[in-house]
Structures are given as structure tokens and as C-alpha cells.
Image (tube, rainbow, N blue to C red):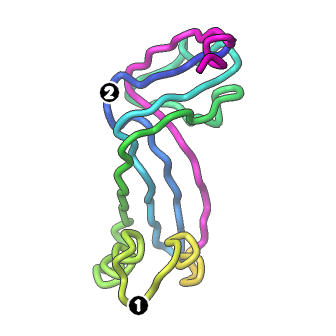
Amino acid sequence: MKYQIIPLEMGSIVDREIFQSDNMEIKCGLVWKLGSVLTNSKPSFLKNYKPEVGICIADITGASISKTYHGEKVIYFSQTVPEALEDELTDIFYGVSRKFSGLYQDIFQDLEWKLVRSESFMFGHLEVKEMDDHLLSYK
């Protein structure tokens, strides 16, 4: 049996990366407008789940993001990042830099920002649906 976990509010599934350099930090990634998570194990986290805190998808046994729609890129900086550097890193992140081209993850690391964590999580109120395997294979 497969289980589909669906956040009931838009923007409740997030893919996030955290980069650090010295005393500075970047949090960036995608906020998905809609999406769901699939797992083969019956979700046991629900009895302790707090919608306002959410859960890391890696903490749900066998879970993976299944479907996502309309991702919006977002980037945040610690207060210790100088404004000029924020502007440059923002342009790199959104792919509009005249100085750099390529994947922002590669460029950040080339600029000596260390990727310290990459995670996906969801929050808000959730709906869990049981899905029969034979329905999943029907096309």
C-alpha cells in the first residue's frame, strides 16, 4: 500500500539549501505552490506532528516528493552578509548575473560558500490518502 501526503495549504513543500562562509549564511531554494509526498509506509509521525513546525521529508520512512507544481525560487541572507554581496549572490541565484553563469550551487561553492545542508520539508495541515498499487499502475 502506498500513502500520499498532501499539504492542504499552498506553498507548504519546500526544498532548501543552506550555504555558509565565515560568519555569513544563505538559505535558498524552492517553495512549491502545490505538491505531494509518497511513501510505502503508513505515516506514523502524524500523532506528534505540529503543523506550524512541519517535518523534514527525510524523517518520514521511505518518503519522497512525488509531484510538485509552480516552484518559486527564494533566497534569504543572514544579517552579516553585506548588501553588495547580497545583490551579487541574488543575481547568481536567479540566473541574471552578467559576471557568472551556470548552476548557482556550483558558483556559490566556487566563491567559497560551503553547502552545509540540503533538505526538503513540509508544514501546515496535511491530508493522507491510501493508494492501491493497482490504481497506480493503471494508465
Residue 44 shows in the view? no
Which residue shows up at 40% across the image and 40% down it?
Answer: 69
The image shows residue 123 at horizontal and vertical percentages of 43, 30
Q: Secondary structure at mark 2?
A: loop
The image shows residue 86 at horizontal and vertical percentages of 34, 76
The image shows residue 72 at horizontal and vertical percentages of 34, 51
> Which numbered disc, 1 or 2, marks the residue that appears first in the sequence?
2
The image shows residue 36 at horizontal and vertical percentages of 49, 29
For the residues labelled 1 and 2, the Cα–Cα distance comes to 38 Å
Residue with the mark numbered 1: 99
Residue 48: in magenta span: no
Where, by quadrant of the figure, is residue 84 drawn? Answer: bottom left
- What amino acid is labelled 1 in the image? Lys
- What amino acid is labelled 2 in the image? Glu
Relative depth, front residue between 122 and 22: 122
Residue with the mark numbered 2: 9
Taking 136 as reference, is 86 above or below it?
below
- Tell me the quarter of the image containing the C terminus: top right
Which residue shows up at 61% across the image and 61% down it?
Answer: 116
Taking 130 as reference, is 12 above or below it?
below
Range shown magenta: 114-139
